[in-house]
Amino acid sequence: MTDEFRLRSAAAFSSAFRVPPEIVEETAPATEHAAGNVGLYGWKTPRMDGFELPESDELIIALHLGGSRRVRAVTDQGLSRSCSMPGLVTVLPPGRSAAFRTEGSISLVSLHVPLALAAQLSMPLHASANVPWLPRFAFRDPYVSASMEALLRTARSGQRVRSDYVVKVVDAMLCHLAQWRQSPDDGGGGVLSTATPEARIGRISLRELFALIDAQLGRALNLDELARCTGLGRATFTRSFRQATGMSAHQAINLRRIEVARKLLAETDLDLAFVAQETGWCSQSHFTASFRKVVGCTPARYRALR
């Protein structure tokens, strides 16, 4: 593998952890037009208060294996309420820096996938490389955990790893994560970043709040109304929502509308204007422009690809 790839994939983690990786497995997909390489790294850090990671051009999936059970994400509003602990997964998208408070040593395995390759592998669930991956901190996903552990066991065995095996496992994992982001049953429409669905905003959980949003997607949602459901004032609600999810309520609602629209486009033959109306857009043109911005293609093209 090239020094450039090693620098991109491992140098930031080595610098943050102040130790080199204990396990290094770097695989070039065996295809002529592969858009980069996959890196798998095993880490065991010294005791430390925390660490920071700069922006990268890679999608990073990390599995917490052991050590501190008090790892928290650092956000603009302070420490996350949820903690990472052994068995939980964190997803860091390209172009996003991150900081964490660890309060001790941790062991983890990290998978690094260049964004262009991630877009190739997760097709056709992603219509283009412009579909944004959202950050997700400390969530439980048995499929991702089992896949990461399988890759780690293979790397630890000392045997020469078949590149097609690694790429197929990563491919399946990315498709699973992409589908999870699109699922209407995950309690947050894929928009949660530093909180679990059971995290609370005021007197209700995020899961309950998104259920309320889902039930009213077909009409203009009023932030004052949502704030009253949580027992908070508008300003406090707006601040608490951004702290919990990493985005504004307006952004989250629009993403939710698009996810529901994707489901309707994929599973029904409903007219595009009706889909726009059912998901709360003021006009079909606004729906098309917003859908293209997030998904990377028009609603009609998305339906054709399904």
Image (cartoon, rainbow, N blue to C red):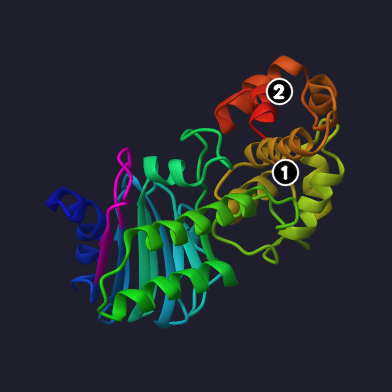
Which region shows up in magenta?
24-38
Residue drawn at (57%, 32%) of the image: 294
Residue lying farthest to the top in this orientation: 285
Residue drawn at (40%, 56%) of the image: 167
Judged by its main secondary structure, the magenta piece is loop
As drawn, the label of residue 234 is: 1
- Which callout, 2 or 1, points at the residue further toward the start of the chain? 1
Residue 52, horizontal then vertical, whole percent = 31, 60
Q: Is residue 35 located in the magenta-colored stretch of the structure?
A: yes
Give left or right: position of 55 versus 284.
left
As drawn, the label of residue 287 is: 2
Residue 53, horizontal then vertical, whole percent = 31, 57
- Whether residue 81 appears in this view of the structure is no
The amino acid type of the residue labelled 2 equals Phe
Give left or right: position of 277 versus 151.
right
Local crowd size for mark 1, using a 10 Å CA cut-off: few (<14), some (14–19), many (≥20): some
Q: Which quarter of the figure is the C terminus placed in?
A: top right
Residue nearest the viewer, comparing 250 with 135: 135
